[in-house]
Image (cartoon, helix red, strand yellow):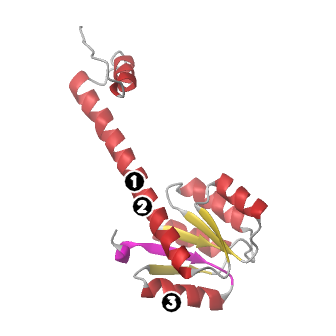
């Protein structure tokens, strides 16, 4: 994975934390986009389309959970990792249920944080590869058999049996 193309949206209301985390991330080859509150975070998320989001739970203008939900509505494929001093098990469980990739307490073990970022990116790349393969598979069946409404049930059946070891004869 080439880290120089990975941009991280770093959302925290404390400037010192943005600076410290930003320096560490930059030293490890990541591009950093800082944001100090929820409004700036969502704006940067839309404009920059980051690879990963590091998000604080408590922001001055709204909760991190609200920001997570808004970002998820915009693009669910971007991994969002909570990094917060207000970490407790119920909050972590809620965040994961809402779609967060992980939940890390401050101050973080930076080796663990970097590993979590890399794993989140690998997961995102694998999900994109599956989506691309699925689209190619669907397109190839439709190009061979046609995309008419009458062929759609046949294509669905072929997809269902494609994962099995059965032999199939098509007649038409």
Q: Where in the figure is residue 145, as x and y percent of width and height?
A: 24, 22
In the picture, which quadrant includes the N terminus? bottom left
Q: Where in the figure is residue 147, as x and y percent of width and height?
A: 30, 25
Q: Disc 3 or 1, which lies upstream in sequence?
A: 3
Q: Is residue 171 above or below residue 14?
A: above
Secondary structure at numbered mark 1: helix
Query: Could you tell me which residue is drawn at 50 percent across and 75 percent down?
Result: 114
Q: Tell me how far mark 1 sits from mark 2, CA to CA.
A: 6 Å
Which numbered dot is residue 23?
Answer: 3
Q: Nearer the viewer, mark 2 or mark 3?
A: 2
Write down the region rendered in magenta.
Answer: 3-13
Other residues around mark 3 within 10 Å, as few (<14) / some (14–19) / many (≥20): some
Q: Where in the figure is residue 171, as x and y percent of width and height?
A: 23, 8
Q: Which residue is mark 1?
A: 126
Q: Which residue is mark 2?
A: 122
Give the side of residue 24 with respect to residue 71, left or right.
left
In this orientation, does residue 49 appear? no
In this orientation, does residue 154 appear? yes
Query: Pointers 1 and 2 in contact (CB under 8 A)?
Result: yes
Q: Where in the figure is residue 32, as x and y percent of width and height?
A: 48, 80
Q: Is residue 148 above or below residue 5?
A: above
Give the side of residue 90 with respect to residue 144, left or right.
right
Q: Does 9 lie within the magenta span?
A: yes
Q: Tell me how far mark 2 sits from mark 3, CA to CA.
A: 23 Å
Of residue 85 and residue 136, the one placed in the foreground of this image is 85
Q: Tell me how far mark 3 sits from mark 1, CA to CA.
A: 28 Å
């Amino acid at each position: 994975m080439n880290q120089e193309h990975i941009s991280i949206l770093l959302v925290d209301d404390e400037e010192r934390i943005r600076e410290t985390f930003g320096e560490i991330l930059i030293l490890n080859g990541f591009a950093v986009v800082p944001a100090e509150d929820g409004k700036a975070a969502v704006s940067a998320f839309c404009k920059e389309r980051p690879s990963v989001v590091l998000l604080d739970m408590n922001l001055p203008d709204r909760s991190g959970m609200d920001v997570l939900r808004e970002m998820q509505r915009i693009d669910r494929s971007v991994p969002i990792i909570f990094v917060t001093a207000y970490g407790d098990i119920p909050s972590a469980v809620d965040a994961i249920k809402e779609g967060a990739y992980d939940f890390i307490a401050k101050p973080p073990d930076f080796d663990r944080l970097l590993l979590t970022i890399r794993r989140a990116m690998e997961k995102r790349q694998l999900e994109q590869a599956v989506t691309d393969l699925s689209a190619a598979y669907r397109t190839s069946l439709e190009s061979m058999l046609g995309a008419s409404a009458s062929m759609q049930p046949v294509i669905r059946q072929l997809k269902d049996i494609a994962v099995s070891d059965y032999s199939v004869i098509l007649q038409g």
